[in-house]
Amino acid sequence: MPTSLASNEAARDAVLGRVRKALSAAEDRTRASAAANAYIDAHAQGPRPAMPADLVARFMQRATDMESTVERLDDRAAIPAAVARYLDALVLPPALAEQKSHRGVCWPEFADLDWKGAGLEIEARPTIGDDRLGITGTFCAIAETGTLVVLAGADTPTATTLLPDTHIAVLRPDRIVSGMEEAFDLVRRERGRVPRAMNLISGPSRTGDVEQTIVLGAHGPFRVHILVVG
């Protein structure tokens, strides 16, 4: 064990030891540890709202409520044209109008699409910070809250969801789950464990810190557009 980690473990045990002593608790933690692990492994759930049978419609409605825009497509090949239509329809402030561009980056899984045929210049690479458009996939989505779930990985660079002004996310309808509980279950089932980073995205970045006025794009994209494909 690295020295710093060992020191942290020792410090934690010392603090918890003093707490147990103050509470007159027994030093043997075997039973308490087993009970805690059993509770975690059970993935107990509290009361939850009823959900409709049509999770796709529910997700699209809730995503719209969260200031995302959503379009339904039948075919994956239609993605470039849909992206071009969306960009053409954007109304930007005069100061940004001259910077409007059909250039951006995408995850590797979309490198095969005919971006040039749609009049777009899209590179399959991680963003380097000055890209205005980022196109990504999603691990899954949550119907209850209209939330996209993105997992970090070599082929799924999460900076592409965070740094560009515009984030376009591609989602398959069969990857929409009812609630957060099902999303975490899916992660455990398919990945075995939660990855290094797991991002839950509910609409554009926003803040209400200044005079309780909502401002979009405070800590990330100004806009999120979702393409439900399939």
Image (cartoon, rainbow, N blue to C red):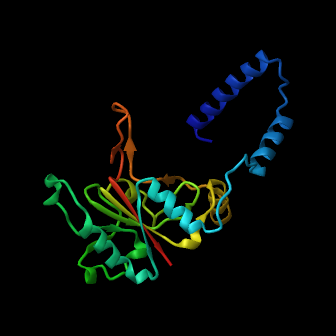
Task: Report the front residue among 50 and 218.
Answer: 50
Q: Is residue 201 visible?
A: yes
Task: Report the number of numbered marks.
Answer: 0
Residue 98, picture quadrant: bottom left
Judge left or right: residue 66 versus residue 89. Answer: right
Task: Report the front residue among 211 and 148.
Answer: 211
Taking 87 as reference, is 35 above or below it?
above
The residue lying at 65 percent from left, 33 percent from top is: 9
Q: Position of residue 190 (x, y in %)?
A: 64, 66
The residue lying at 32 percent from left, 52 percent from top is: 222
Q: Position of residue 46 (x, y in %)?
A: 73, 46
Judge left or right: residue 106 versus residue 7. Answer: left
The residue lying at 59 percent from left, 37 percent from top is: 5
Q: Position of residue 35 (x, y in %)?
A: 83, 40
Taking 43 as reference, is 138 above or below it?
below
The residue lying at 51 percent from left, 53 percent from top is: 200
Q: Is residue 150 visible?
A: no
Task: Report the front residue among 217 and 71.
Answer: 71
Judge left or right: residue 106 versus residue 176. Answer: left
Q: Position of residue 27 (x, y in %)?
A: 83, 26
Taking 44 as reference, is 74 above or below it?
below
